[in-house]
Amino acid sequence: MINCIVVSIGDELLIGQTINTNAGWMGKELNKIGVEVTEVLTISDKGDAIKSALDYASVRASIVLLTGGLGPTKDDITKKVFADYFNVPLVENKEALEHVENFFKRYKRPMLPINRLQALVPKECTMLLNKVGTAPGMWMEKNNTVFVSMPGVPYEMKYLMEYEVFPRVIERFNLPVIVHKTMMTLGLGESYIAEEIRDIENNLPEHVKIAYLPSPGLVKLRLTARGEQKNILEETIDHLFDQIEAKVSAEVYAREEVSVEEVLGTKLLEKGCTISTAESCTTGALAARIASVSGASRYFIGSTVAYANNVKKTLLGVTDNTLSTQGAVSQECVEQMALGAQKMFGTDYAIATSGIAGPTGGSEEKPIGTVWIGIATPHGVVSERYQMGKIRDRVVEKTILTALGKMLSFMK
């Protein structure tokens, strides 16, 4: 196994000022070429921390990738520590200097003496030219371990990985084939799915692993196969997916990592149908999710956020009798909301949501997390009551996913 440890350098990462998206992207892309990321270390901009991370990773990984700390200012010390670690001086690289000079000429900006420091690299390193920035990448080897230092700016790191690092890693190592495929499910928790497919999981081939990736209202099932022939690995996973889907077919909405709103959008386009929403507890978040898909304007017509009862009455036609006798969180209300939106926007389908997201407002009859979802269809209206838990954000997210999943069932 060729493994990699990613070292992310920056105090801004440790204090949460910047989210470490680099490590996630690197892990995903490295797996595609057969390199497994076994650890991600996030460390401060301090020499001792960087050196300790290099010492730690050097005996545990075939590849060590560092990001961050390569700017020209005094707080960027990675390059100096990197050179010290290999006991070599920093030297000016002619190609790197020419690139930096041209960079400032191109943007008609003055090049300061401090910018010239970007052309310094450890002696004997392989300089990786960064065509989208001024800080070059640096490739060094020691005791059969490859060390690569790159800028932390995401688009610069991605450029260097795609055009410099990946080609060299593929040439340098005898890499296995790794195939990942993900099945997307809605409506069941991971423990329920695990119980349904227990026999399949217990009899997986040794070279195939399964992972459950749960989030509110959704579970991803990822199968990973390692071997030498990609087509055989893909066939193995497809066969296993057939077995799994036979067990939990009602919950599966895709056999690739794709959002439910994307799948729904494709189905609506295929059938030439339109959709709208009328939202109370989701306050427009459901509409935003539907409209987030490129091309949604061809099927998504509009939405009403009817948070107050008066809006439910005046815009959607919910009756005074319903609101006074059944309340806003009720079957009658959500069905009238759905029908009202269907009529208002002239759509084939309309989804309505009404519930108690919390953390206050619940009662014994309607506790926090009670949600009604209604869908107006060309053949009438249907609705169902759900209990979505007690955490507000999770209630909203689960309501959105449940509503989209319920809507998708009409598209089959």
Image (tube, grey):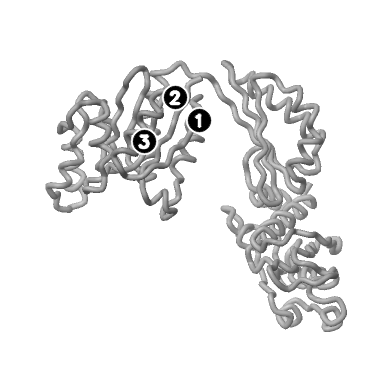
Residue type, numbered disc 1: Thr
Residue pictured at 62% horizontal, 40% vertical: 257
Instruction: Give the alpha-carbon distance from disc 3 to disc 1, as whole Å.
Output: 14 Å
Q: Are marks 2 and 1 in contact (CB under 8 Å)?
A: yes
Residue type, numbered disc 2: Arg
In the rendered image, residue 14, in percent from the top left (x then y), is placed at 42, 49
Residue pictured at 57% horizontal, 16% vertical: 228
Mark 3 or 2: in front is 2
How crowded pointer 3 is (Cα within 10 Å; few <14, some 14-19, many 20+) is rated as many
Residue pictured at 78% horizontal, 78% vertical: 317
Q: Is residue 229 left or right of residue 361?
A: left
In the rendered image, residue 291, in percent from the top left (x then y), is placed at 60, 59
Residue pictured at 80% horizontal, 36% vertical: 195
How crowded pointer 1 is (Cα within 10 Å; few <14, some 14-19, many 20+) is rated as few
Earlier in the chain: of badge 2 and badge 1, it is 1
In the rendered image, residue 276, in percent from the top left (x then y), is placed at 70, 64
Q: Is residue 111 above or below residue 3?
A: below
Q: Which residue is mark 2?
A: 60
* Secondary structure type for disc 3: strand
Residue 276 image label: none
Q: Is residue 155 left or right of residue 233?
A: left
Q: Is residue 192 left or right of residue 88?
A: right
Q: Which residue is mark 3?
A: 66
Q: Is residue 390 above or below residue 360?
A: above
Q: Quadrant of residue 54?
A: top left
Q: Which residue is mark 1?
A: 38
